[in-house]
Image: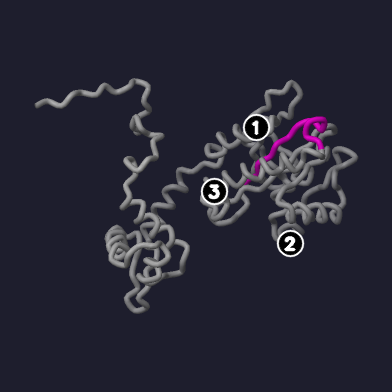
Amino acid sequence: MREPTIPESPRRARGRPKAWDDKSDQNTIKSLDRAMAVFEHLSTTSGATLSELAADTDQSPATTYRILTTMEARGLVEFDAGAQLWHIGPRAFLIGARYLRRTSVVDRARPILRRLMEATGETANLGIARDTHVLFVSQVESHASIRAFFPPGTLSPMHASGIGKALLAQMTDDRLSRHIATAPLDRFTVRTLTDPAELRADLQETRARGYAIDDEEKTEGMRCIAAPVFDWQGEAVAGLSVSGPVSRVSLPQTQRLADAVLRAAADLSAALGAEGKA
């Protein structure tokens, strides 16, 4: 008997079934889920015994052993017979490296920037360090009539930029000293930090609270709140910020906006493979 043909919706995106958003048990492969639990837990250790893995993942030793030997055949894990320990295998690194090759900070940031703009109502920016400046590489503008505007390709001195100060605050003392010694601390407004001691004090406060504030230091009447973005090696590779007129990005609103920026920076860091940033 011929099985009925189910017409496919022309709107359906390729690679996604009709029930893409259905996360119920019927669309979950439980054995694969258990295997990934073992694999992910093993990745957090420097080696673990079979009994430790079974106990830590709440699975039987027999099930855990089958999972490990299956992944061992794929090179995802390996066994040290002398120490009787299981470790992450070389193929896990290769797969991770392939992911990193296709991961562009700009591409990953785009939806996060849009969500940040919608959550705060202010222009959201992505910037990276270029020598002594911040290079703005992406932006989602606010819908407000009065708004900040930093088109991609804009350069701003790091000491007078929210993103710049967020990145400077992550530098080692030696690297920061070299930066201050070589970068001119030009004045743009009466609030610009041009004294090295004052800049260092501001960066210390920035590091302690997790976010930077450009308090009319580059442009009078504009305020910016920024946080660093980290990659899989824990390096600060970019910064996210919201910026707008001081009438809206007011000091009483600072913590609310900073919380949104910090969440967005953590989301982008996690997307780039940073540990514990989600």
Residue 241 part of the magenta segment: yes
Is 45 drawn above or below residue 164 in the view shown? below
Task: Say how the picture is coloured.
Answer: one colour
Q: Name the amino acid, label 2.
A: Asp
Left or right, 216 with respect to 40, comes to: right
Q: Residue tagged by mark 3?
A: 270
Q: Position of residue 30 (x, y in %)?
A: 33, 50
Q: Residue tagged by mark 2?
A: 173
Residue 150 part of the magenta segment: no
Q: Name the amino acid, label 1.
A: Met
- Which of the marked residues, 1 or 2, is nearer the chain's N terminus? 1
Name the one closer to the observer, 76 or 181: 76
Asked whether disc 1 touches disc 3, contact meaning CB atoms under 8 Å apart, the reply is no
Name the one closer to the observer, 152 or 4: 4
Q: Position of residue 61 (x, y in %)?
A: 32, 67
Q: Residue tagged by mark 1?
A: 117
Asked whether disc 3 touches disc 2, contact meaning CB atoms under 8 Å apart, the reply is no
Left or right, 149 with respect to 48, comes to: right
SS assignment at label 1: helix
Please name the residue shown 67% across and 30% down the image. Answer: 151
Q: Residues within 10 Å of mark 2 (few under 14, many from 20)?
A: few
The Cα–Cα distance between marks 1 and 2, rounded to whole angstroms, is 33 Å
Chief secondary structure of the magenta portion? strand
Quarter of the picture containing the N terminus is top left
Q: Position of residue 263 (x, y in %)?
A: 62, 44
The Cα–Cα distance between marks 1 and 3, rounded to whole angstroms, is 19 Å
- Magenta-highlighted residues: 238-250
Please name the residue shown 63% across and 51% down the image. Answer: 236
SS assignment at label 3: helix
Q: Position of residue 84 (x, y in %)?
A: 35, 76
